[in-house]
Image (tube, helix red, strand yellow):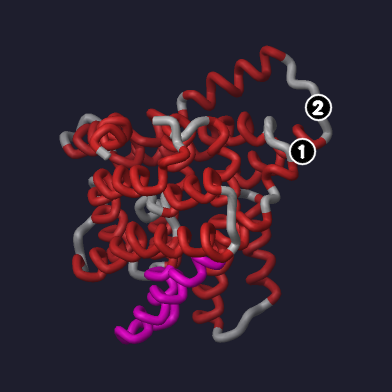
Amino acid sequence: MVEIFFKTLPFFAIIGLGYFAARWKFFSSEATVYLTKFVFYFALSAMIFQFSAKLSLSEFLNWNFVFAYICASLSVYSLGFVVGLMRGNPVSQAAVEAQCCAIGNVGFLGIPMLALLLGPQAVGYVMIILAVDLIVFGSLIVLLFLGSRERKIKFSILITLVMGLVKNPMIMAIVTGLCWSIFELPLPDPFWEFVTLLGAASTPCALFAIGASLVAKTTERVQTAVWISFVKLVLHPLAVAVMALLVFEVDFYAASVMIVASALPVAGNIYILAEHYQVAPQRVSASILVSTIVSIFSISLVMSLAGSSFNF
């Protein structure tokens, strides 16, 4: 575990650098916003395209893997949702807590870190998880937000969901890359070098942006944040392990990647949604902060337990 911890430490050190740069005003909140946009729309999308263009459709559509992850995440999501309702929260707030329990920072932290630590063969599995998070659970929380507000599901809500997916650059990068692979389209060397160079910027920039964004996070409702962090960092990977290894009998290496990816801290895009719809953004903020700090140590533990198939 100590060896794995030291391998993950540089990633969290860059997060820490971003945090202190923003804390000491070397990096403004406006600069953080634009750095995040650069990573989201350009660098990370280029990296995702680069990897997905090398995947075959059969590699991406691993249905046992998909169903194992969905079932495990739904069980954790349901737990978070029910506990939220039992504490007297309205549906929308229970939904945002459930989302925090089940969705990790796969895009900004997972793909860059796991691609380097677990090898390029892990990226396809991580992108499946990212696609499920964005398409299934990203749609579910918006459906619950708007449905609870409107008291019924309108056709316009479904249009909003579809347009949100179409406009998401990470989804588009996955789809475009897979199309490139399926149709075996040629990739000119200058274009490939451009994508590679741009994608290489995603890892340090994404990690720095995560750290800088933590400065704005609050620790309001710490008890709730601790509960959510426990579910996300402990129960979620445990549920994934049960579904992947015992129920769906996923290949051990793929299952190990899924377990590690499920141990990532709460995703930052949940805060964006919570802020946009004004549904408990401070609660999400605290959950992101607490889970990210704890994950510095918990990810190493999960990797050591799940990683006998990894070549550290």
Q: Position of residue 100 (x, y in %)?
A: 39, 63
CA gap, disc 2 and disc 1: 8 Å
| In magenta stretch: residue 85 | yes
Task: Tell me if residue 138 can be seen.
Answer: no
In x, y percent, where is residue 148? 51, 81
The range drawn in magenta is 71-98
Which of the labelled discs sits on residue 76, or is there none? none
In the rendered structure, the answer to whether residue 250 lies left or right of residue 111 reads: right
Q: Secondary structure at mark 2?
A: loop
Residue at 34% in and 39% down? 30
Image location (x, y in percent) of residue 293: 23, 48
Magenta span: predominant SS is helix
Name the residue: 38% across, 50% down.
264
User: In this view, which residue lies farthest toward the top?
Assistant: 190
Q: Is residue 236 above or below residue 32?
A: below
Amino acid type assigned to the residue bearing label 1 in the image? Cys
- The residue identified by callout 1 is 179
Q: Is residue 101 in the magenta section?
A: no
Give the mark nearest the N terminus, 2 or 1. 1
Secondary structure of the residue carrying numbered label 1: helix
In which quadrant of the rendered image does the N terminus lie? top left
User: Badge 1 local density, few (<14 within 10 Å), some, or many (20+)?
Assistant: some
- Left or right: 15, with 128 as reference point: left
Q: Which mark is residue 185?
A: 2
For residue 312, what is the image quadrant?
Answer: top left
> Which residue appears at 52% of the width and 63% of the height?
246
Which residue occupies 58% across, 36% down? 48
Mark 2 belongs to which amino acid?
A: Leu
Verify CB contact (< 8 Å) between mark 2 and mark 1: yes
